[in-house]
Amino acid sequence: MVAKATPVGKIRRLAIYLDENADRLVSSRDETNGHVRSLLYFVLGEWRPRKWRPRSEKVLLSPLTDFKVLRVLKVEDVDEVEVELPSEIGNMVHLRFLSVRDSKIKRFPSSLGNLICLQTLDFRVRYVELFIPNVIWKMKQLRHLYLPRRYTASGNLKLSTLGHLQTLDFLSSEYCDLKDVAGLTNLLKLQIRLSLPLENLEEILKSVGSTLNRIQSLLVYNGYYSVRNTSYEEQGNQIVSSCRRIYKLKLDGPTAELPKELHNYPNLTKLELCSCSLKDDQMGILEKLPNLTTLLLISEVFEENTKILVFSKGGFPSLQFLSVFRMDEITEWRVEEGAMPSLWRLRIGFCSGLTTLPDGLTYLTNLKELTIFGMPRELHSRIQEDGEDFCKIQHVPSVVIGEPYDPPMQ
């Protein structure tokens, strides 16, 4: 059992390190509990359940009844055992912040609806499909609501009453009504998951257009990677087209084609593309984004038969940071003279098909930082001081080279 420190005065912040005696770490008769404002639960690194180490199947965070003035409750990274929140949590009516991020929790008690003072609610649990009670609408002071990518609910989660909401991750087309966004007049960040096609989307977008036009950060997750559905792709583009003031955009899942008017978004500076399977000609749209400063390309950004990645002359005029990660389909990368003239930071990782760096890196005279990791051993040998590609990167002041990646034996 973790040693318990001797109380000194009135405790305002209390951290509990969970072990096999976790249910006895907080005593309901402890007089200091009545003054605690912040309660944080952690798992000690040396206490991670192993096959040979007995442990209970669940950790019940109780008793909590004596924390009458608690403002902050964090149960984060507790993913080795299932955590169960007691129904008494609904009595903690002064809570402003509740997070169970990256913990293993499958459901929440409906008494959460009593927490009407909550401003931040983080439901981003790990490894499980969470059941969420339909009580969030009662928390009218919420500023930041983080839902997991996968969750279930009884009917649609009502969200239209959350007029103070600034952050909403993830709104699911299966368990939420996009029309509710019309009431979220302070919304700045939206993540939406298209798990079911939306009916009458054009009419819905007209009704919520004024709210969407104020959004600054948008993520559209197009269904499941294993399922390609053109309706998801088209509807995702329609949503993007309704958010013309965004400065940050992430597209996750099959997309095929980008909105053609994307180059007219005046504030768009950050773009992340993940598993989009874009057509070859879409690079032409990307290169023309005038104000783009950050571009992240992750895992099958282009169609499977796209083997060559080309950055053309004059393309990406404002780009400063480029990350190319897990683009296994790419076997050749070309950077033409005049491309990415402002680039000063480049990161390349886990692209198993690339065995050589592009000759055009020598044209990137403003490049200050280069990070290479997890690449084939052949490429790693070529960028050593006596290697064939060293001349391409010797002008870069800071070069960080990580370990090469050796694919597993067949």
Image (cartoon, helix red, strand yellow):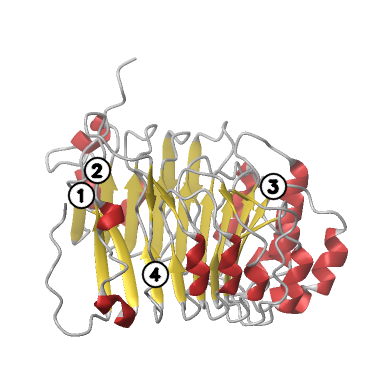
Chain-order first, disc 4 or disc 3: 4
* Residue labelled with disc 4: 73
Total marks shown come to 4
**Residue 31, quarter of picture:** bottom left
| Mark 2 and mark 1 residues within 8 Å of each other at the beta carbon | yes
**Which mark identifies residue 45?**
1
- Label 2, label 1: how many angstroms apart (C-alpha)? 6 Å
Q: Amino acid at mark 4?
A: Leu
Q: Quadrant of the C terminus?
A: top left
* Residue labelled with disc 2: 48
* Spot occupied by residue 23 in the image (x, y as percentages of width and height): 31, 54
Chain-order first, disc 3 or disc 1: 1
**Which mark identifies residue 195?**
3
* Spot occupied by residue 102 in the image (x, y as percentages of width and height): 41, 53
- Label 4, label 1: how many angstroms apart (C-alpha)? 21 Å
- Label 4, label 2: how many angstroms apart (C-alpha)? 22 Å
* Spot occupied by residue 360 in the image (x, y as percentages of width and height): 36, 50
The reply, left or right, for residue 265 in relation to residue 319 is right
| Mark 4 and mark 1 residues within 8 Å of each other at the beta carbon | no
